[in-house]
Amino acid sequence: MSASVAAFVAASVAAFVSATVSVSVPGFGVMLGCVADAASVGETCGADGTPYPPLTRPHPLLPLPAHHAGTPAHPWRPRLGSLHPAPVEGGPFGAPAAQAVRRRENARTEDFRPTPPLAARTARTGGSPVREILALTARPEVISFAGGLPAGELFDTGGISAAFRHVLDEAPRQALQYSTTEGDPALRAAVAARVSARGFATAPDDLMITTGSQQGLSLLATALLEPGDTVLVEDPCYLAALQVFSLAGARLVPVPTDDGGLDPQALDAIAARERPRLLYLVPTFQNPTGRTLPAGRRAAVARVAARRGLWIVEDDPYGELRFEGEPVPYLGSFPGAEDRTALLGSFSKIVAPGLRLGWLRAPAVLRRACVIAKQAADLHTSTLDQAAVARYLAGPGLDAHLERVRGAYRARRDALVDGLGAALPEGSRWNRPEGGMYVWASMPAGYDATALLPEVVRHDVAYVPGAPFYAGPADVGTVRLSFVTHPPEEIQEGLLRLAKTLRAPRP
């Protein structure tokens, strides 16, 4: 065969390959379409002289690998951002090769369809402003009153570490294995004992363990709500609960509150009018306000729920963080509420949030529905974490830890509350909670906490504006201030920084 015939055959094969072959090139991480001519194999592109891989080019609808960014295109390969190759004029088989590639790419384009849109409920449910503020204020120099972050220096790292070591030394096969959806029997027994000691008789079988109490709330929404169902919430309300109910497609109706918490008379009137499926509330050291619903109002809420036929979701993450005053019984323990209350609890605030452990107490029929929903969600909560916390609760570690935490939080509450008068504008109001993690403050008319936040953050301090917590019309002058994350001396410095914005002369 003559040299000219051999060149002709080689070029013909190259044109055929360019129109029909796709290969996977190691290191590119994507499937690449191929186009080349025999003469171009081995030619270089770019000033560094790096050769193109033989017979390859990236598909124009897929991104190039990073090392190709800024590299001049080979004249027989498509320019970046072009859907078609640019053949060299007069090339022996440039036009046929380009036409074949164009036909193949047009066919792919015709077959291409966009993916379906996301579910509408994801579009109507916004992200958490609290989480977004935490991301903005993560710099170590910022003194943040924004997040409800337990004081990390108070974690019982020694006791928790010992519990994990014991479990892994004594029963590693069980601790690392799958478990039941309902949860570790020893942990449920320990939780039942603590709930019963607070006046709400509870058996281990009344409980299931959840991956944080937030999952318990999601399971209840799955078990109880159809799209369009009405949910009554305190106004203002725990923000993540609003997200859960929004994702469930519920219609949120706010119930007015005052300094004593939810108004039972307003609740009765709204329940009669709206015919809700459930009422959600945090009756003890509420998030965001820090308020506690008195016993008389709890009894009234229980009577309304029984008379109007609705479920109660009682969320109690802060109940064991009381550092002054007398405990108030669980709402679910009052007559009329016992068989219609789902009680949520958490280890995040009393042990450590990184464990992601919570629990749910509910009547049998509702609990069974939540078990099924959890099976579909994650099968069960971490076996190892449950076993370690059960071990931790079996000794005196938690009670000793809580005594230490309550004393520290009381001092931090005092530092914040006692200094707010010099930090907030004249005419502001705030409360003095007997436990929990939050203080709720209201600035006078003309102050917008959201609009002021960027200037506040420029002084390396932060809070959460109150507006996002409202299901109804918001009071834009309100703020939530967490007192647990920083020690008193840092709280005092944070208040000085806060005053630079909030006490500054206004135009």
Image: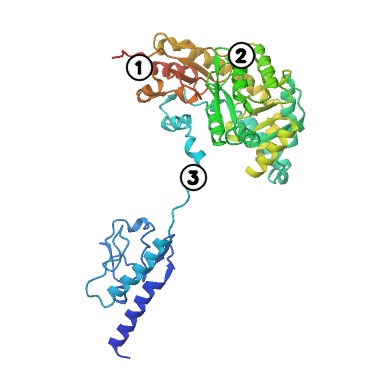
Q: Nearer the viewer, mark 2 or mark 1?
A: 2
Mark 1 lies on residue:
500
- Residue sitting at 57 percent across and 25 percent down? 154
**Please, which residue is most extreme toward the left here?**
89
Q: What kind of residue is marked 1?
A: Lys
Mark 1 vs mark 3, CA separation in Å: 44 Å
Mark 2 vs mark 3, CA separation in Å: 40 Å
Task: Tell me residue 91's x, y (percent).
Answer: 25, 75
Mark 3 lies on residue:
118
Q: Secondary structure at mark 3?
A: loop
Left or right: where 167 falls relative to 496: right
Q: Is residue 43 shown above or below 221?
A: below
Q: Is residue 36 shown above or below 64?
A: below
- Residue sitting at 54 percent across and 17 percent down? 256
Mark 1 Cα within 10 Å, few/some/many (few <14, many 20+)? some
Task: Tell me residue 258's x, y (percent).
Answer: 54, 13
Q: Residue 283, located in which quarter of the rendered image? A: top right
Task: Tell me residue 142's x, y (percent).
Answer: 41, 26
Q: Residue 109, located in which quarter of the rendered image? A: bottom left
* For the residues bearing labels 2 and 1, Cβ distance under 8 angstroms: no
> Can residue 32 be seen in this snapshot?
yes
